[in-house]
Image: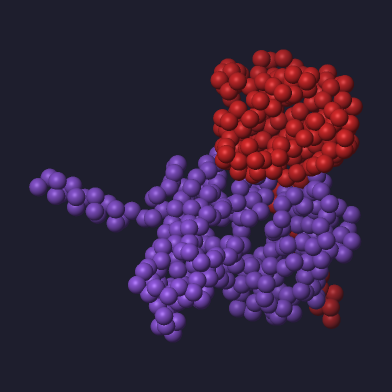
Amino acid sequence: MISNLLLIFFFVLIHILPVSAQQSGEVLVWAELISESKEIAPNDSFYIAVKLEIKDEWHTYWENPGDGGLKTTFAWTLPAGFSISEPMNSYPKRFKVDDMINFGYDVETSYLFLVKTSNFNDFEKSFYIKTELTWLACKEECIPGTSLAEITLFPTNDPAEIIKENPEYFKMVERTIPTTGLKTEVTAELNNEQIIFIIKDPGKSKKQTQIEFFPVEQGIFSYSTEQKLEINENNYSLTVSLDPMRGEIPDKINAVFYSPEGWDENGDYKAIHRKIKIKK
Amino acid sequence: MLKYFFSLFVTILFVTNIYAQVQIDAEAPKFTLADSHGKEHSLVDFNGKYVVLEWINFDCPFVKKHYNSKNMQKLQKEFTDKDVVWLLICSSAEGKQGHFNNDEINKRLGEAGANATAYLIDEDGTVGKKYGAKTTPHMFVINPDGNLIYAGAIDDKPSTKVEDIDSAVNYVSDALNSAFEGKEIEVKTSVAYGCSVKY
């Protein structure tokens, strides 16, 4: 009788524990794999997202962590012949910790990946996908950790039968990824120890009131100095200081510009991503 | 009409840049700090010698990586044996992570087997901010003329994983060895990685 109760207890426990519970160290980050569809077809592609929930008051890091920190990385286990893209990162938040500036995420964020399937022809076998995340979470102190997330998907030989799962979630995530689309044009010019970005935003009738610049590459800009935004009739001018300890200034800057008002007419896309040649 | 002259300046105030702008091949900022035994050390005391400054916070996982693996202690031993002065500097403010009283830090240094010349206390962060120290570890190398010749990361593998050390290029070691041999230092600056300094 007792052994039966124990079995039931463990069965229930296993099924209520989230996948992210399979992680090392203090639980600060919970990870979940979410697929665009439960069924997949050969020679096809689909999106998969890694959703992170981050413990209150803690934050993880963007691909450029800022002054200290470490970006989250992913090690994938994929079915034979499958491939996966680099992570598409959501736009970050700016955290000020002890006079330092960090770029990252708190509460919740998602990373998007594009998976390409193989030319499989066995439609009886399911597909197992797993990722091991390595993260650094910081509050005042920093704690590194790993989380595992996994998902099983099922084959179909008829792509037309595939039903999109979680369309609202994927739409939301797609909008947090800095877009390379939209008509906003950005130029950059070196001016002594600063870069001046001129942002032309022809597609939007309402003016931006705030623009924040996030450099994708590390070591070029000073993060703790102020960014000066000038709002003009036909454009915005954003002046950003270079890091005095930088190496050579690159020819192009990989940049994200965030605006709380958004860059499209509806304000759905809060961040744009541009590779900008620097006029020296 | 007015709209054609519309121009509004907005400043996004994050923080004022409180960090001095140290430069490679320029004079390293002078300082005097007390060590964990109460003895004062000034940078000028070490004129004529190579000096390594290592920003430290023993509770930072990036620092633990290099101390638990004994990587940092080996480096300290290798270069202090060659008459290099190796100064640990802790800029953690009182009450913040990495700040310890002298008894505690001397105990930790003993347990870690540190081979540094001294552990200097910079709890008001003055020296850290003069150098623009942002992370632990953050490394600086000063030549016998008192000029800064390297600033940045300890190596090229930003991680907390001990297993990354063996395959990493150690920038501090490379800078010192190149300087000893009179060669140009290949990497004079790099992006420091680690926990942010707890000013």
- Kindly identify the residue that appears in the image at 40 percent across and 68 percent down: A153
- Which residue is farthest left? A1
Query: Chain A, which colour?
Result: purple
Residue B120 location, quadrant: top right
Q: Which quadrant: the C terminus of chain A? A: bottom right
- Looking at the picture, tell me which residue is in the foreground, A63 or B98: A63
Query: Closest to the observer: A76 or B188?
Result: A76
Q: Is residue B68 left or right of residue B28?
A: left
Residue sitting nearer the eye, A14 or B178: B178
The location of residue B141, given as percent across then percent down, is 79, 32
* Residue A251 percent across, percent down from the top left: 83, 61
The answer to whether residue B98 is seen in the rendering is: no
Q: Which residue is at a point 85% across and 74% down the rendered structure image?
A: B5
Q: Position of residue A228 (x, y in %)?
A: 78, 59
The residue sitting at 68% across, 46% down in the picture is: A67
Q: On the picture, is A132 further left or further right than B84?
A: left
Chain appearing in red on the rendered image = B
Q: Within the image, what quadrant is residue B82 found in?
A: top right
Single out the residue that lies furthest toward the bottom: A160
> In the rendered image, which quarter is residue B34 located in?
top right
x 19%, y 52%: residue: A8
Q: In this view, does A12 lie above or below B109?
A: below
